[in-house]
Image (cartoon, grey):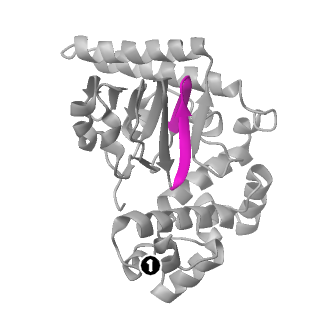
Amino acid sequence: MDQSLRITQLSGIKRFSFDYSKFGDDYMFAHFTSSKNGLEYFSSPVRFDGLLFVLCLKGNLEVEINLEKVVIEQNSLLCLSPDRIISSKQTDFTNFEAYFLFLSPQLLRNLNIDINIINHSGPIASFKSNSRTSVIELESNETELLQKYLELLHLNTTENSNDIYIKSISRNIIASTLYQILHFASKRVSPEVSDDRPKSRRSNYVHEFISLVHRHFRQERSVKFYADKLFISPKYLSLIIKEMTGRSAAEWIDECVILEAKNLLRFSGKNIQQIAYDLNFTNQSSFGKYFKHLTGMSPSEFQKT
């Protein structure tokens, strides 16, 4: 799992899909049904570098997200943040139907959406959660509304493929869809999370810290490194991260490192020494001590589980 897949590398999904559309590197839509099961594509672990949404219309889907079992049932929406690894071991897809929407990082950067809203609310990220995966249970009318958004996006892509306005139209449909998802999610967020924190300077530090950790954790495990990037002291960074997320800055860093280590040990085919090198440990021994301290088992023991 050294590299995240881009939309252009996921085009094989087309042959498994009942309906399919794609616009360059911006987005890809796929309609999976029990009669033409696209989930076979995910029988091996896949990591996508953007956002993935799965709207379940019928049946249910059981997947593993970063080694954790997640069940997506009818009238629910899976929101998968970048760099999470997904795989499906399910074999019975009777009456299953779902829409998949893949959004590239470049598209997300270009959309005219308040980044603080996306990163601090709803399904995209919850700083109180230990998981970067969220499943939102929807009302039937909410499912129908999201279904119409995605069908409109698909129709716009397939019917207007040569139109000079397609990119602007599609991006506005996607932006509206994201806001609609955030609206649905906000109604389900507890008062503890749904306060005015996105407006605070401290909350911006939290968002920037989390983003930095996801970019640099393979090379840097020091709180001081991230504090320096934010031009604040390690003590202050530790204070605000603990206060606003319930976990220390070091715990956030360790979580990313251990999760990546587990994925590499389980899926990469590399030996422990190579994995230690990939994660910037001085040697296999130091990696083994770090891993066992945080998980209670050695890397080799984990591989056997």
Is label 1 in a helix, a strand or a loop?
Answer: helix
Mark 1 highlights which residue?
276
Residue 35 percent coordinates (x, y): 30, 25
Tell me where the magenta segment starts and ends, as one range: 67-79
Residue located at (71% from left, 28% from top): 188
Q: Which residue is drawn at 46% across and 31% down?
A: 54
**Few, some or many residues within 10 Å of mark 1 (<14, 14–19, 20+):** many
Q: Which amino acid does label 1 sit on?
A: Ala
Q: How many marks?
A: 1
| Vertical order, 298 against 257 (above or below) | below
* Residue closest to the eye, 17 or 247: 17
Q: Residue at image x 32%, y 48%?
A: 5
Work out which quarter of the rendered image holds the N terminus and state it: bottom left
Q: Is residue 130 above or below residue 198?
A: below
Please provide percent x and percent y for residue 102: 38, 34
**Residue at (44% x, 22% y) in the render:** 174
Residue 76: x and y in percent read 56, 27
Query: Where is residue 236, by image quadrant?
Result: bottom right
* Left or right of 219, for residue 191: right
- The overriding secondary structure of the stretch rendered in magenta is strand
Tell me: 191 left or right of 162. right
Single out the residue that lies furthest toward the left. Answer: 162
Foreground residue among 277 and 90: 90
Q: Is residue 40 above or below residue 184?
A: below
Please say whether residue 261 is visible from this viewpoint. Answer: yes
Residue 7: % across, % down: 30, 39
Where is residue 22, by image quadrant?
top left
Q: Is residue 218 magenta?
A: no
